[in-house]
Amino acid sequence: MLRLFLTHLFLISFAKAPEEPALRISEHLEIREVTVTAYCPCAECNGSHQAGVTASGARPTPPEPGLLDLREALHIDTLASRLLLLEPELLPNGGTIAADIEHYPFGTQIYVPGYGWGTVRDTGGAIQGRNRLDVFMRRHSQTGPWGRRTLTVAIIRPD
């Protein structure tokens, strides 16, 4: 009996506890602290085999603020070019996020502070586990200043 108890105690003390989110609000919404890095379409970020599409088959996009975003309204050249291109989006459009799809399936919406809303549409070799994300940027010069950040994100899982 003592042997069984000690074996059980040993297994409990070395068992890996399941990873819990910082805050689960509902079945589809959770708040979690993650490490976020950035990538762009260049060969340095993606390797030489990148073909301009994500693992989900979509083209990667940075977040687009939309015409009604007050932060962008101050940049007249950006606003004017958006009007000239006749982009129909008035509301913000989420960027592409790479994640481990075992934890965040394609279509998962994630709010990343400093980046905005994004949608999981990509994967990456270094993006493993539930606490690691990679956000898409338009230019390589934007990825360096982003660096590696530990942020609290909001995650909305698809139905």
Image: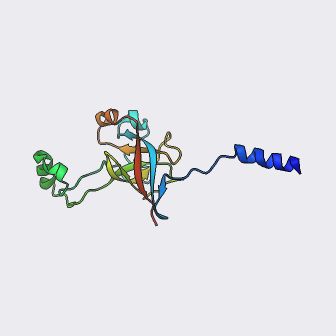
Residue 105 in sight here: no
The residue positioned 29% from the left and 42% from the top of the image is: 138
Where residue 139 sits in the image (x, y, percent)? 29, 38
The residue positioned 79% from the left and 49% from the top of the image is: 8
Q: In the current view of this chain or complex, which residue is farthest to the front? A: 2
Q: Which quarter of the figure has residue 158?
A: bottom left
**Image mark count:** 0
Q: Nearer the viewer, residue 128 or 88?
A: 128
Vertical comparison of 37 with 156: above or below:
above
Vertical comparison of 53 with 37: above or below:
below
Where residue 18 sits in the image (x, y, percent)? 61, 51
Where residue 62 sits in the image (x, y, percent)? 30, 48
Q: Nearer the viewer, residue 126 or 22?
A: 22
Report the side of 34 relative to 82 (left or right): right
Q: In the current view of this chain or complex, which residue is farthest to the bottom? A: 159
Report the side of 133 relative to 59 (left or right): right
Vertical comparison of 42 with 26: above or below:
above
The residue positioned 52% from the left and 53% from the top of the image is: 103
Where residue 71 sits in the image (x, y, percent)? 18, 49
Q: How is the image coloured?
A: rainbow
The residue positioned 40% from the left and 44% from the top of the image is: 151
Q: Which quarter of the figure has residue 36?
A: top left
Residue 135 in sight here: yes
